[in-house]
Amino acid sequence: DAKTTQPPSMDCAEGRAANLPCNHSTISGNEYVYWYRQIHSQGPQYIIHGLKNNETNEMASLIITEDRKSSTLILPHATLRDTAVYYCIVRPLNTGFQKLVFGTGTRLLVSP
Amino acid sequence: ETGVTQTPRHLVMGMTNKKSLKCEQHLGHNAMYWYKQSAKKPLELMFVYNFKEQTENNSVPSRFSPECPNSSHLFLHLHTLQPEDSALYLCASSQEDRPNTEAFFGQGTRLTVV
């Protein structure tokens, strides 16, 4: 399965956009990019996923490069409650979630 | 609220105690999972149940015993644990025959073994 690389930490000012990068240079054509986040001591929360097109929902936008080797999660107006660890995960299309590998993620700190 | 409920939220137990963690989902999912998250470590998959059958056991010590009586409920029975078993235990569920979908996690049980 493709592995992902994320910066260990990022800072963002409240109200500004938070852009979290993820590198998945070995991704194959049948693998989705998933994003989860984990607020301190809580269960991971699903944010968004995509295959090759950009996606947007009420929480965030996901921008996937044309070659699919990297992606960016965008939180358009970060709030203090967005402080969390963000995980970028690659999931093959026809495998179960047990194949999801949660790495160490990016710790996003949103400050006033 | 994710539709996956774990109880209790916090548990303190002695090394000789027997306790159980409970997970319940009302999402109609057919797969449920137990994960362990130790301090400052990534999530570790422990057990997977598909259609109530255990399909994965990631070399978990026998002092952890899962049970899945039906597709909505999952238990983790604990006995003679060690202090290093103190961690956040997370339950998740998903619909395994639908590829373009996601897994939902409960809020976890914070376990402390004394």
Image (cartoon, grey):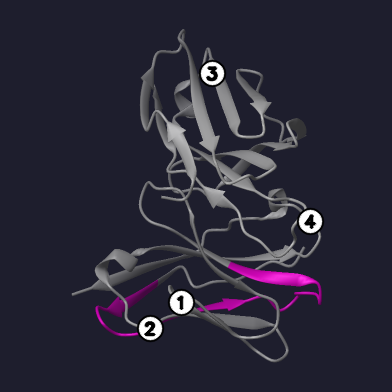
Q: Which residue is mark 4?
A: A95
Q: Residue B76's quadrant in the figure? A: top right
Amino acid on which the number 2 mark rests in the picture: Pro
Q: Residue B87's quadrant in the figure? A: top left
Circle 2 chain: A
Nearest the eye: A84 or A52: A52
Circle 1 chain: A
Circle 3 chain: B
The answer to whether mark 4 and mark 3 are in CB contact below 8 A is: no
Which-is-in-front pick, marks 3 and 2? 2
Callout 3 secondary element: strand
Q: Is residue B99 left or right of residue A41?
A: right
Q: Which residue is mark 3?
A: B78
Q: Which residue is mark 2?
A: A76
Nearest the eye: B11 or B26: B26
Which quadrant: the N terminus of chain A?
bottom right
Neighbour class for label 4 at 10 Å: few (<14), some, many (≥20)? Answer: some
Amino acid on which the number 1 mark rests in the picture: Ala
Q: Which mark is residue A60?
A: 1
- Report the residue at 70% width, 70% height from top: A32
Amino acid on which the number 3 mark rests in the picture: Leu
Q: Position of residue B84 (x, y in %)?
A: 48, 28
Q: Is residue A100 above or below residue B20?
A: below
The answer to whether mark 1 and mark 2 are in CB contact below 8 A is: yes
Callout 1 secondary element: loop
Highlighted range, magenta: A10-34
Amino acid on which the number 4 mark rests in the picture: Thr
